[in-house]
Image (spheres, grey):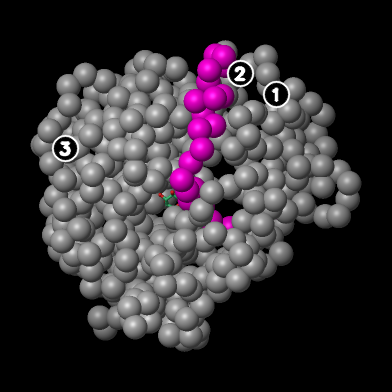
Amino acid sequence: MIDPQTLAARFPAEFLFGVATASFQIEGASKADGRKPSIWDAFSNMPGRVFGRHNGDVACDHYNRLEEDLDLIQSLGVDAYRFSIAWPRVIPDGTGPINEKGLDFYDRLVDGCKARGIKTFATLYHWDLPLTLAGDGGWTARSTAYAYQRYAKTVIARLGDRLDAVATFNEPWCSVWLSHLYGIHAPGERSMDAALHALHYTNLAHGLGVQAIREAQPELPVGIVINPMHVIPGSDSEADRQAAERAFDFHNGVFFGPLFKGAYPESVLSAFGARMPAVEPEDLAIISQPLDWWGINYYTPMRVAHDPAEGAEFPATVSAPPVSQVKTDIGWEVFAPALGDCIRTLNARYDLPACYITENGACYNMGVVDGVVDDQPRLDYIADHLQVTADLIAEGYPMKGYFAWSLMDNFEWAEGYRMRFGIVHVDYDTQARTIKKSGHWYQALAKAHSAAASA
Ligand code: FCB
């Protein structure tokens, strides 16, 4: 087991250790104080979409347990908390009236963090789009980007003075491809044309959001959280290497290109240009405004091979087998070196700002036995990825912080509550929280780091 003290010494004093959550996954109280449904409320109540038809009605009941959960975060000794704000609490119909009670909740959350000496990293959009907007086309409609801009402006006007950082979006790959092309996440569409629209309007919304945030709060560090794929060719063959290049463009280039170079990848334009929505003259300039930071969410690498099927649609790849047989309970290959290589590759290809690891963690479903949760594999997973992070710092990469996903077990999207990522266990019958072995270890790490930093 990696000694937390020794590991802590590898991180500079200003490095932040944090924990992360997202609104829909933990809050519950789905009808409280004026909140209206999001696309995830609708999706999770449709048959066959989410495991066991689990939904977000109660979740971790965090909305009603805010103070005790903030105490829990404080007890972990971490520097920062990454949470997301639910658009359907703040502007329940997406456009139209602002719901002050929804904002009040986040006011209490932010003040509660400040009172406990915890830095606040807010994500404006972690997938809970107000359902009313879906009626207008959701992310496939350009109007949603402007609705998002107003929402961003509303949140920052109220909370911006007390935030330490803000992210416009969480993992646009998921809210674009996984939601509109692969049909796994809400709204569950399977259409390349719809997905290409969602792609451009999400990118545009990001840029419009950055404008709104900077106008309201010029000093607030603004960024975006992306889950870049570390694409590894399944073999050394030229065909597989080219497949990996195409996959890189399709999964990463469509976000990093517009954001950091002001252009979509050539390969994607030549495959889909005619099917993309109109890109207005100003759009790419709006999308590519310089950012103060970016966040990487990393769990597992993507291994691809060339898809030999006749007429296979771009990027024309199939999955290649994992090299490591070690998998978490959700079936994701454990391969820590890919985190390092992903950061190296992206920095070589784009001019990137400071970086936080905004999510990293592992799914292991062991429960409480005699009051204890022995989740050694999660502890090892986090420790190994932190070693890689420390290596990156030693190489000179601007890695500024690490947020464990997740503070506590929660609603794992299409997997419902059966997949657990928390460093704190949640008993969904009693809502009891039990710090797991990994949580105690992370606490020791964070405390050792703070002690050394203040010495
Ligand atoms: C990421 C999501 C996060 C969580 C983890 C396991 O894709 O951002 O909400 O579900 O995966």
Write down the residue under mark 1.
269
> Mark 2 — residue?
276
Q: Which residue carries the number 3 mark?
A: 102
For the point 43% across and 82% down, the residue is 4
Residue 175 picture location, percent across and down: 47, 36
Mark 2 element type:
loop
Task: Please name the residue shown 32% across and 61% down the image.
Answer: 80
Q: Are marks 2 and 3 in contact (CB under 8 Å)?
A: no
Q: Identify which amino acid the numbered label 1 is placed on.
A: Leu
Q: Is mark 1 within 8 Å of ligand 1?
A: no
Q: Crowding near pointer 1: few (<14 within 10 Å), some, many (20+)?
A: some
User: Could you tell me how far apart the alpha carbons at marks 1 and 2 are, in whole angstroms?
Assistant: 8 Å
Q: Is residue 321 visible?
A: yes
Going by the picture, which residue comes out furthest to the right? 238
Decide if residue 395 is on the left or right side of residue 169.
Answer: right
Which of the marked residues, 2 or 3, is nearer the chain's N terminus? 3
Q: Point out residue 336 in the picture as x, y percentages from the top left corner.
A: 60, 67
Look at the numbered disc 3 and give the secondary structure of its residue. helix
